[in-house]
Amino acid sequence: MSKMLKPKSLLLLMFALVMAFTTACSSGGDNKNASEKEGEQSPPAEEVKLTQDDPGWKVDTSPITFDWYINFAWFPNKWGEDITSQYVTEKTGVNINFIVPAGNETEKMNTMIASGTLPDFITLDWNNDAVKKMIEGELVLPLNELAEQYDPYFFKVTDPGKVSWYTKDDGNIYGYPNASSSPKDYEKFSDNITSNQTFLVRKDMYEALGKPDMRTPEGFLKALEDAKKMFPDVNGQPLIPLGLHDFHEKGNYSLESYIQNFLAIPLEKEGKLYDRSTDPEYVKWLKTLRQANEKGLLSKDIFVDKRPQMEEKIAQGRYFAMLYQRSDMANQQNVLYANDPNSVYIAVDGPANSNLDQPTLSGPSISGWTLTLISKDVKDKARAIRFLSYLISEEGQRDLYLGKQGVTWDTIDGKDQFLPEVVELLNSDRGAFDKKYGASHTFWMMMDTNMTPAWAPPAVEPFKQMEDWTRGKAHSFSQFDQLDPDGSSEEGIINDKVLTEWGKTLPKLLLSSSDAEFDQVWNDYLAKRESLGFAKVQEYRQKEYEENVKKLEEFLK
């Protein structure tokens, strides 16, 4: 049933009809242009000529709903249930129906690609093989071509360095990143740049143990051992001495580049990519973890638990120490803090190399975290690119981060910032905050983490300590992004087999009964890797690395 026109809308309609009638009478029948004589319609809205200074989304704010696929099974939020998303829809006319995989993300993505039909927007990890499959299968549209035709504003609000970085050999850019920092951003925003990578310990337990030094293998093992003796259980459930990211078919993030960054292992030496996985410091720490397992310090849970199970155990405070990203546990930190401020997790100096060098942690790179692409099946090309440009723009960043002025934020003491009651909920119950307000990166698909700190409230405990610990330790590793070959190429197929082999090998290394058995498993893996043709992968990656270095040099000019 059509809605009745509001009085204001009715007046506007009557005014428009009067003006149209007056114009027609004054111009006379013989003066009509050819298209009107032939009964053609006037140019549609998308043909309105716009410049780079014109926010295209303002051309049409009529209601439209886009389907937006998020390739993360854990993404919990719905559009339209909170103040921020309601405000954005009210302002732009755009409503979003999020689609999230119920189970395995890779299977869902592959199924959609095989069908040849995709939702309007797609957001996934920038390094996901599906990105190349979608581009090569012509399932997604070039953003630059959409912008040229419908929304030049896109070129004004996007970062030229990021556009160049993601421009393919055909001259087109198909996806735009979130949480991306170029080398120039590091110069401009250095004070605000932090890392998510942390080594965490439960504060009360760590202090009860006398704040042990866990940088050396000996100190690390002793602290885990002492923690298990002093705190055998947590509220009737066994303590888990060490927590990691989840194991999957191709390995475990905590035990790869993550711990290698803590050990400050270089990624290149004299212009040549360095195989960090064979570094003696890294192998020594894998053997340390093998010893930990031999001493009963690696719980079986860590080999099988996925993120939902881990989140439950973090909220219960069952881990003593964790090699884990601090931003992935914000809700659980709040739960612990509410129960007992001393039971939270804090960042401390963790595994280090023999020289005890400061870690070289991964800060935001130019590749960012995720890419968002627009499907060839998008229901309205003009509205889609214009909405994307709006989200990327400072106006869109402000709207998505702060919400609605006077409701979630206002200008206080000369600064645009959240209202006190909003900050209070943000700091006390992130889940409730997301549902009620939907601000502060609840919808993070296009978040610009260089821009939004200007509006962010000061970090408070239990988050401030973890964040501050990473300052000065975050580095840009942009030149090492996007090195891996396409999954369908010869090198890509080899790389996939090597990674799968690594996924099988890693648990075996930790579960080895002796260092001798560890060495046997390790040598078998290296031999298998070589026989699969790993040298070809490294040769490919070296060429890509050299190209990246050239690209980044251009950005810095």
Image (cartoon, rainbow, N blue to C red):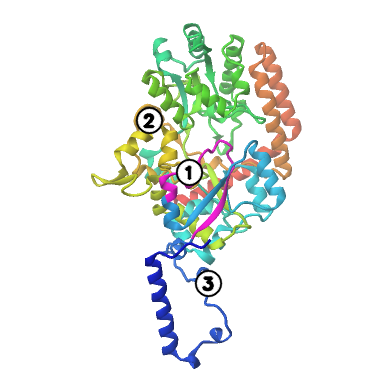
**First to last magenta residue range:** 63-86
Total marks shown come to 3
Q: CA distance from mark 1 to mark 3?
A: 33 Å
Q: Residue at x 34, y 39 (%)?
A: 422
In percent of width and height, residue 440 lies at 41, 41
Residue 319 versus residue 400 in the image, above or below: above
Nearest the eye: 157 or 7: 7
Q: Amino acid at mark 1?
A: Trp
Nearest the eye: 402 or 394: 402
Which of the labelled discs sits on residue 44, or is there none?
3
In percent of width and height, residue 247 lies at 62, 26
Residue at the left extreme?
A: 413
Left or right? Give the position of 213 relative to 290: left
What residue is pinned by disc 1? 444
In percent of width and height, residue 478 lies at 51, 42
Q: CA distance from mark 3 to mark 2?
A: 49 Å
